[in-house]
Amino acid sequence: MKHIYNKGNGSSRTLLLLHGTGGSEHDLLPLAEHIDQDANVLSVRGNVSENGMNRFFRRLAEGVFDEEDLVFRTKELNEFLDQAAADYGFDRDNVIAIGYSNGANIAGSLLFHYQNALKAAILHHPMVPRRGIELPDLSGKAVLITAGSNDPICSPKESTDLQTLLQQANADVEIHWENRGHQLTPSEVEVASQWYQRL
């Protein structure tokens, strides 16, 4: 997978950056800088192209995921993380995802499918990746969801459903609401930074 890797300043943490639809591996680098200047950074570009826009998995329509492709791409990303940890020498058990929109959805899918894929996750405007499946035991995993109460793409119910499903799998989940739409706001980033400092 196309990616950027920046070695940190002695931190054992690695930030996994996952962009939104149409983004690239460069999009979230400023967030990583704001949240933890010392962490390793692994920023990945989605392997799927939708009308020339980078995505992490296919969709059938707006808000309708191609579940078969989602499962395949989630496995692909998890295996890429294993390989990247071996190649770059970072701690595979201390990876914290920061995802926005489509990137938040693939990060959520990692949590839904692989018990030890992530230590923690910051999910900006995520949806429920899959319904009707049994999640692994996520005890000890911390998740922050940020959501817009007027988000036209990701309804508030998606965010609260995701919170419930993760909590039922024993994850420690916080949710932060903005009276905004689907955009990623500076105040959300600040909330994420403060949450991260408590990990």
Image (tube, rainbow, N blue to C red):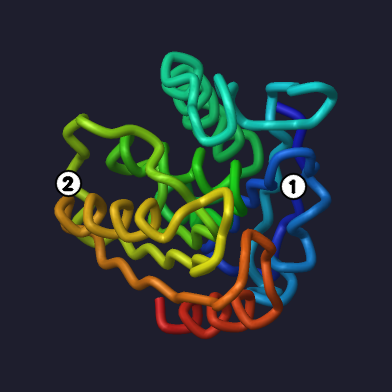
Residue type pointed to by label 2: Asp
Q: Nearer the viewer, residue 76 or 20?
A: 20
Q: Is residue 20 left or right of residue 101?
A: right
Residue named by callout 2: 137
Residue beneath the point at 27% across and 34% down: 131
Residue 60 seen in this snapshot: yes
Q: Secondary structure at mark 1?
A: strand
Left or right position of 115 against 65: left
Which numbered mark, 2 or 1, is in the foreground of this view?
A: 2
Q: Give coordinates of residue 141: x percent, y percent.
A: 30, 59
Query: For this view, does 146 lie left or right of residue 35?
Result: left
Q: Residue at the location (69% across, 22% down)?
A: 48
Where's the C terminus, which quadrant? bottom left
Mark 1 residue type: Tyr
| Residue 5, numbered label | 1
Cα–Cα span, label 2 and label 1: 29 Å
Q: Where residue 31 sits: x, y (%)? A: 71, 68
Is any atom of residue 14 visible in this view? no
